[in-house]
Image (cartoon, rainbow, N blue to C red):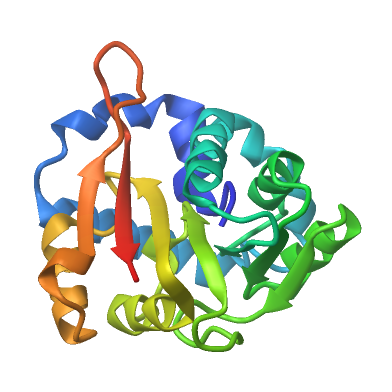
Amino acid sequence: MIGRGPLHLGLAAVGIGLACAAVRSERLVLAIRALDRRMDRDHGMFDERLARAWTLAPRLYRGLHLRAARDVVERVSRQDATVLDIGTGTGDLPLLVQERLPSASVVGLEPSAALGRIARDRGVRVLEGRAEALPLDDDSVDVVVSSLSTHHWDDPAAAFAEIRRVLRPGGEGRLYDVRFGGLTAREVRLAARSAGLPADAVDRSVLDEGLVGIRPYSVVTIRA
């Protein structure tokens, strides 16, 4: 999901990303995420009224999207690879990937019909659906990527299992999110265990990109 939710606009407006390194409490992370979800639900942040506003938000996360696109390219080993972007929003990340991998099949998955229409208008192939029930065949995707989306997932364990299901042998999932709102290390471990994934198939790390030593983003890696 690209640039979604009041949590992300707040990040841009007040520089909340500078506080990420100081966040160590899982309770605080869960509270921030709950507030974000409540505002999404109560104020229709992804419906027709505000969908066009999200075309501006991705500019704030250009650096993260460029990093994600670069990582995808590094993990593709064949010309006709299939790349799936979960929570594609207005389609910025798929466009960056397609630009770098013109022969690949790049597909976005988006639960919001309004955002999906914007991405399609920009030339992105978009499926409507959620991470917990991917509308794709087993062993059909080379790389799964997601940007600023995991904190919206209702059931991370189901999503992890689905990602592993659709990945081809040797494939990989890369799930990027903000550290103060995304899945914590403990949540990742529990979700992987609940999904029945081997301990060495899933890990979480902090990206090295940031400002003056502050690293605001984390990435969850899922290996086929």
Q: Indicate the position of residue 144 as horizontal and vertical percent values.
A: 50, 63
Q: Quadrant of residue 207?
A: top left
Q: Quadrant of residue 189?
A: bottom left
Quarter of the picture holding the N terminus: bottom right
Drawn side of residue 12 relative to residue 165, left or right = right
In the foreground, 214 or 40: 214
Quarter of the picture holding the C terminus: bottom left
Q: Indicate the position of residue 171 as horizontal and vertical percent values.
A: 43, 65
Q: Name the residue at the top extreme.
A: 212
In the image, residue 224 sits, relative to residue 45, either above or below, namely below
Q: Quadrant of residue 190?
A: bottom left
Q: Indicate the position of residue 20 as horizontal and vertical percent values.
A: 25, 34
Q: How many marks?
A: 0
- Residue occupying image coordinates x 51% and y 61%: 143
In the image, residue 206 sits, relative to residue 33, either above or below, namely above
In the foreground, 127 or 155: 127
Answer whether residue 179 is visible to the viewer in this image.
yes
In the foreground, 12 or 213: 213
Q: Name the residue at the front extreme.
A: 78
In the image, residue 123 sits, relative to residue 134, either above or below, namely above
In the foreground, 35 or 17: 17
- Residue occupying image coordinates x 20% and y 75%: 192
Drawn side of residue 62 relative to residue 112, left or right = left
- Residue occupying image coordinates x 75% and y 70%: 126
Q: Indicate the position of residue 4 as horizontal and vertical percent values.
A: 56, 53
